[in-house]
Amino acid sequence: MTETFKREIYLLRPKKLSPETIAVTFAKTSRSPLSFREIAAELSDEQSSEFHEKWVVGYGHASVAEHAVLHIAFENVSRLAIECIESNRLASYTEKSTRYQKWDLKGYCIPEEVRGTQYESLYTDACDALFSAYQESLEPVKAVVQEMIPQREGESDARWDGRIRSEYVDACRFLLPAASLANVGMTANARTFEHAIRKMLSHPLEEVRSIGEQVKAVARQETPTLVKYAERVPYQIETQKALEERAGALPAASGGEMLELLAYDQGAEMRVLAAALYTQSGCSFVTALEHVRSLDAEAQKSLAHELLGRLEKFDVPLRAVEHAVYTFDAIMDQGAYFELKRHRMMTQTPQILRADLGYAVPRKIAQAGFESRYREAMDQAAEAYSRLAEWNPHVAAYLVPNGFNRRVLMTLNLREVFHFCELRAERNAHFSIRRIAMRMAEMVQSVHPLLAAYLRMPEEETWGSIEVEHFTQV
Ligand SMILES: Cc1cc2nc3c(=O)[nH]c(=O)nc-3n(C[C@H](O)[C@H](O)[C@H](O)COP(=O)(O)OP(=O)(O)OC[C@H]3O[C@@H](n4cnc5c(N)ncnc54)[C@H](O)[C@@H]3O)c2cc1C
C-alpha cells in the first residue's frame, strides 16, 4: 500500500458534524475523489440541506438519509401506541418493562376520542378496576413467590425483592391494559423515521397521530430536511378502511390452537444444505441441489453437522439457513405478543387487539387466592371493551389487558427460528412466550428434523409442562 493509497478508518463524529452533514459526506463519495474529511470540511449545514432537497427529496435517492441517525425519547405513551412506534423493522428500541417495574394506579392513557363523551366513565372505570386489581394483586402474589423462593441468610428485604420481583410481577402484569403508559427509547436513521412518521400520521388513533406530529417536530430540530415532507399517507388510511369493511363479512373464530404451522417447504432442508455448499463453490445452485439430494441420509446428516455442529452458545447459524421459511398462525396472550413484536427479523401480521378470544389465568394468581378478583376485573374490562368496540374498535383496544389472547400471523426463516426459540425459551424469559418458543421449536423439529435438531432448547421442560406450571387457563 503506497502513502497515496494509505488505508484510513476513522469516525465522523456526531459531536462535530450534524447528522445531515454526515449523510451528505458519505453520499458525496459516490462522485467525489476527495477523502471524507475533505468533503466534510467543505460542507455547511445549509449546503447539506440543499443537497438533501435535491437528491433525497427531489430525485428520491432516499438511502442517503440512512446515514443520519437520531435517538428519540418517548415518555408516557400508551402501550397501544408503542405497537405502532415499534413496528419499524430497521430501528432499535428499549422500553419500560412490565416484568421489572410496577405501574402506578393512574398510569394509563385516556384517549382524546373518549374524553367528554358518554364512554369516558365506562373507560376510566374499567381502567381503574384493572389498575386497582393489579395493585392489590402484587402483595398476595409476592407472598406466594416468597414461599417458593425464601430469603437468603443476611439478604436485605430490598435485595430479596429485587431477586424475586419479576416472578410475581410476571403474573400480575396480565391485568395491565394496553392503555398503560410507558417510556421507550428509539434509535433509527432519518429514512426509517420518515417512514415511521408517515405511518403514525396515518394511524386510526388520535394519540398515535399526535405522537407522529411531535416526532416530526423533534426530528426536524436535528435533521431539518430529511423528515420535512413526511405526511399522512392516503394509501394507508383508505386501504385500511376498505379492508376493514371487507373483513367485516368474515366470521370471528372464538378459539384455536396456540400455534398452527400453516406453510413450510418439505424440500427446504435440502435447499439450505445446497445453499451452504453453493456459496463455497463455483457451481450453479441446481447442481449443488442435485448433489445434496443424491447423498444418502447419513451423508446429508453429516453435511448438516458441518453446517450447524460447531455452533457455540452465542453463535448465529450461517445465512444459508434463511432459505427455509415457515408461516404460523398463533394465538398468544397480549403480554407475549408485546414481546414477540420486538423480533424484527420476521414478518408479523397481528389482528387488532380484541377481547373476544378469552384470557389466560396465571397459576400464581390462583395460588394467591386472587382468581375471583382477577376474573372480576378482566370480565369488567371485556364488557367495557364490547360496548366501546361497537362504537370504535381501535379505541376499545386500549382497554384490553395483557392477559387476553390475540392472533398473529408470522412468517420467519430458520435462522430467526433459532434466534427466537433459543432466546425466548431461556429460563429468564416470561413463561407466556417460553411456551410459544418451545412449541414452535417442537413443530419445526417435526418437519425439518435434520437441521432443527441443532436448536439449543431446554431439555427438562416442554411447552406443555410450562403451561401446567404457570397457568390454570390459557
Ligand atoms: C430476558 C429478556 C429481557 C428483556 N428485557 C427487555 C426490557 O426490559 N426492555 C426492552 O425494551 N426489551 C427487553 N427485551 C427485549 C430485547 O431487548 C429484544 O428487543 C428482543 O428480545 C428482540 O430480540 P433481538 O433484537 O435479538 O431479535 P430480532 O429483532 O428478532 O433480531 C434477530 C437478530 O438480528 C440482529 N438484529 C436485528 N436488528 C438489529 C439491529 N438493528 N442492529 C443489529 N443487529 C440487529 C441481531 O443479531 C438479533 O439478535 C428483553 C429480552 C429478554 C430475552
Image (tube, helix red, strand yellow):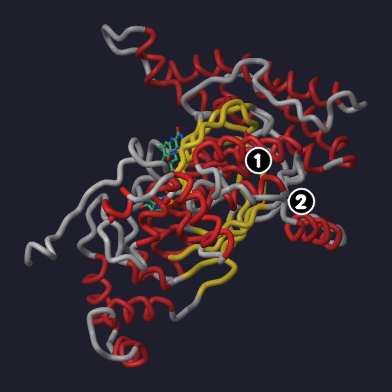
Instruction: Name the residue beneath numbered marker 2.
Output: 254
239 in relation to 102, above or below: below
Indicate left or right for 56 with 273 as reference.
right
Residues 172 and 225: in front is 225
Q: Position of residue 451 (x, y in %)?
A: 34, 69
Which class describes the residues within 10 Å of circle 1: few (<14), some (14-19), or many (20+)?
many
Whether residues under marks 1 and 2 lie with C-beta atoms below 8 angstroms apart, the answer is: no
Which quadrant, please, contains the C terminus?
A: top right
CA gap between label 1 and label 2 equals: 34 Å
Q: Amino acid at mark 1?
A: Gly
Residue 455 or residue 385, whichever sits in front: 385
1 or 2: tag closer to the N-terminus? 1
Q: Relative to 110, is 409 above or below?
A: below
Q: Secondary structure at mark 2?
A: loop
Using the rendered image of the protein, determine whether residue 397 is visible from the camera's viewpoint: yes
- Find ligand 1 in the image and state its quadrant: top left
Residue at figure coordinates x 58%, y 59% from the top left:
57
Quarter assignment of residue 378 = top right
Quadrant of the image containing the N terminus: bottom left
Q: Which mark is residue 212?
A: 1
User: What element does badge 1 sit on?
Assistant: helix
